[in-house]
Image (spheres, grey):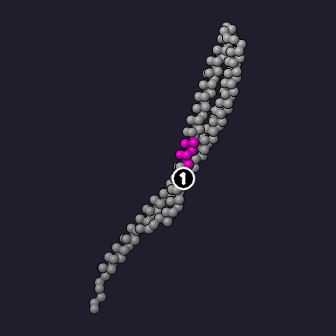
Amino acid sequence: MNKYPLKRMLAVRELREDQAARDLRNALDELATAVAFWEARKAEVVECRHFMRRKEMELAGATVGLKIETGAARGLQRELAAWRYRLEEAEAVMEAAAAAVETAQAHCEAARSAYQAKMKDKHKIENHRGIWQAQADKEAEAAEEDELEESANNNAKPKPAQ
């Protein structure tokens, strides 16, 4: 049986498809990591806001009821200022993480498109191989039939007398 003439091209396309699949897996891992980081930063922002609300309520209650001294009130105000700063930083990091998620999503889409293109390229060669194989089988069968016919004709001819 004949060797498939595009065997090397098929092998190259299989390698390219495998590489595209690895790239897609890496992009999906990158996306999962970015999403996890964003979710953690979002939780931190929520925690900061919750804590600040409690401290603001505590300061407002203390101020209204005049239950605390001026020094303690100033301490609460400084603590609130520190938490506001921490909240601003956490929000900035969360926004950067959201941008990283968007970038990772774009990488995923690009990797998915590349993978689909490589699969399509390989599939074209596989289809060609199927067509080529069917044609090669027909040719081999026709050659075998011709050989059998020729052999039958040679056996059917009378031998010359000696």
Can you give x and y, in whole percent of width and height, for residue 63 in the image? 69, 11
Choose top left, top right, bottom left or bottom right for residue 135.
bottom left
Rendering coords of residue 152 (x, y %): 32, 76
Mark 1 lies on residue = 19
Instruction: Name the quarter where the C terminus is drawn.
Output: bottom left
Taken as a whole, is the magenta stretch helix, strand or loop? helix
Camera-nearest residue between 43 and 75:
75
Q: Which residues are magenta?
A: 23-30
- Looking at the picture, tell me which residue is in the foreground, 7 or 64: 64
| Front residue (pair 49, 133) | 49
- Residue at left 63%, top 39%? 100
Residue found farthest to the top: 65
**Vertical comparison of 34 with 130: above or below:** above
Whether residue 112 is visible:
no
Residue 136 horizontal/vertical position (percent):
44, 65
Q: Is residue 2 magenta?
A: no
The residue under the point 43% across, 62% down is: 134
Indicate whether 109 appears above or below 10: above
Residue 37 placement, left or right of 135: right
The relative height of residue 112 versus residue 61 in the rendered view (above or below) is: below
Which residue is at 45% across, 59% downward?
A: 130
* Amino acid type of the residue that numbered disc 1 sits on in the rendered structure: Gln
Q: In the depicted view, which residue is nearer to us: 112 or 124?
A: 112
Q: Residue at x 60, y 44 (%)?
A: 107
Q: Is residue 154 left or right of residue 84?
A: left
Q: Is residue 34 left or right of residue 2?
A: right
